[in-house]
Every structure is written in C-alpha cells, then in structure tokens.
Amino acid sequence: MNPELALCAHFARLAERDLPPEVAHAFLFQDGPIDAVVRCRDCGAHALLRLLDWAPADFSLRIFGLAALRAADSALFLRDLERGSCQVARAATELAALVAAAGPTGRIVAIDFARERVVASAPAPRGMRSEPDEFPARLPRADDERWFAALGLEKLTETESDRVKLTIAPANLGKEPDVSDFLALLDAYARDPMGGGAPLAGEVRARLLPDLKARMLRGDALVLIARRGELAVGVAVCLASYSTFMGRPALNVHDLAVVPEERGKGVGRALLQAIDDAARERRCGKVTLEVREDNARARQLYESTGFVDYAPGGARTRTFFLEKKL
C-alpha cells in the first residue's frame, strides 16, 4: 500500500531529537497520545503514530509504530479536525480512514512521556513490517520482547509481586475458593466508582450464584478469575450472544474488573486474551463490550487490544448503550 511513501529524513533520525515529534492531533489524551497524527518540527511532514506497547507500570514509556502519510490526506484530515468532525466518539472510524492513506510501518519508536524525550528509534525489523490495514495481525503480540530488543531496551523491571505467576482459569461456582473469590471481586467492582459505587445488595447475591451457574451449565455464560499466585486479582463475566449480521455466535464481556493494586500490570490484558481464546473455541464471530465514556483507563486498554466503536457499514456515528429497568 502506497510503497512510494517514506518517512522524512528527520523522522528517520528521531532518536537524535530531544523531543518527540509535534503532535498535530491525538485521538485520545492520557498523559500522552495513544494514536496520533504527528508533524515533523523541521520540515512539516506528517506521519501516523500508533501505540504498540507500553512500560513500565505508570505507562510513561511507550512503544510506537511510525508510518508516513500523504500530504493531501493529512491536510484533509487536519482540515476536517478544524471543522470538528473528528470527535472521540468517531475516533476509530476517522483513524481507519487515515490509516488507509498511510504507508507501511517504517520505524519503531520509544518515547518517554514523563521526560518528553525520544528514548530510542530503529527501522521496523523485517519480521515486524506490516501494511496498516493488517495491523496488528502480522506483528508480534504487544508484550513481545522483540519490541524492546529492536530498540536496544530492556523490558520493564519486575516487582516482587510481578514475579508471582499470573493465571487465568474458568470459575467453578459450585466450589470454594472460586465462590468467595468471585463474590469478593464482583462486590469490589460494584463499590468502585466505575461500577456504580455501591455494594452488591443481599437479594442480588442470593439470586446471582444459582442463576449464573445455570447459565454456565447451558454454555450461555463464562466466568474467568485471574490469580496472582493464590490471590484473586481480577474477574471477567461473559454472556453468550448472537450476531444476526454475521450469522455466528458472539460473546459479550459483561463485567471485567481488576483490583486497584494490580492495575497496570497486565491482568486486564490477560483476561481479554483468555476471552478471545474462549470466543474462538466457541466459533464466535466477535467479542463485544460496553464501557463508560469517562473510564479513560479501560478505554485505553480496550482500544489498544483492538476494540472499536460499533459502526455498521462504516458509518461515522456514535453507538449508545441503552437500558430499561423492569
């Protein structure tokens, strides 16, 4: 795709710069851009900066792929921004259109946002090269050590708790300790501001286990518990669904929660990977979920793992999740 495109000479020497390229627009700001259009400070050329991985736990160091953009396309994109057409709700669609105009990933870049400097930059290794519309199918997984090896960087230093093995396993809600761990994790999630800020009511607890167990026996529900050693640190509750447009089953992530002290350590990402694996085993056509607009951390995780706003037919619109309590 667009093989004639090449990064400007200044982008190619990015590691020599004291600052990252100027951010012309970022789709989502969270202490730095996640997916962004960047402008060369020297010659004004534009490129697409796409998040590949991050470290350490505070997300200050980020690993990006850098791809060239045609001047006409980037100019149109930025002009659309001035008209206010690119809003966060439509970011995925806007980004997809812009990616179609970009060349293959040309550089792998590590940027330290805490110090606002480029840590390292290197040409994309042959095994990591990919056309943008295939991203990231033919690239290594986000936590692959090769991202860091290509840049001459070490993977983040592990803490003592990080060295304790993380396991993800389906819950057995007929046995301890799965029952007590599940209820404790779900109650903690309910008490969190993003979960409503109130504990699970007694009558909900009374109904929940038998109802969920029955659904699990029918294959209509999946409950996963993440443990660091013996300690339960995360939970996912998924419900079976169906896509009429795809003619295939779907799996909805109804709840996904990680205890506060384990956030940023890969627990949520591991749960999502286990959900993906389970969905493929069920021959599902897609995995769906809902997320609050103000839950920036969760949105960052979901977007970095491939979730986009539902837009049938490529329509540039916003999808609302509605409910009617009975």
Image (cartoon, grey):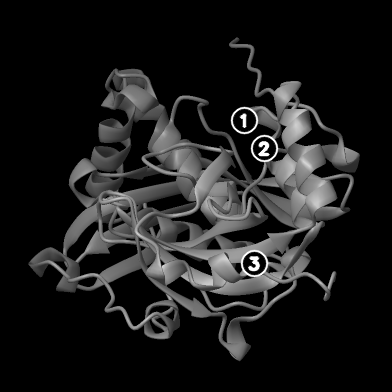
- Apparent side of residue 181 relative to residue 99 in the rendered image (left or right): left
Q: Which residue is mark 3?
A: 8
Residue at image mark 1 = 88
Q: Quadrant of residue 100?
A: bottom right
Are dots 1 and 3 in contact, CB under 8 Å?
A: no
Q: Which residue is mark 2?
A: 91
Q: Amino acid at mark 3?
A: Cys
Q: What quarter of the picture does the C terminus occupy?
A: top right
User: Looking at the picture, which amino acid does disc 2 mark?
Assistant: Ala
For the point 73% across and 65% down, the residue is: 132
Residue at 61%, 52% in the rendered image:
218
Q: What's the CA distance linking mark 3 and mark 2?
A: 26 Å
**From this viewpoint, is residue 141 visible?**
yes
Q: Residue 118's quadrant in the figure? A: bottom left
Q: Amino acid at mark 1?
A: Val
Q: Earlier in the sequence, mark 1 or mark 3?
A: 3
Q: Which mark is residue 306?
A: none
Q: Residues within 10 Å of mark 1 (few under 14, many from 20)?
A: some
Q: Is residue 237 above or below residue 145?
A: above
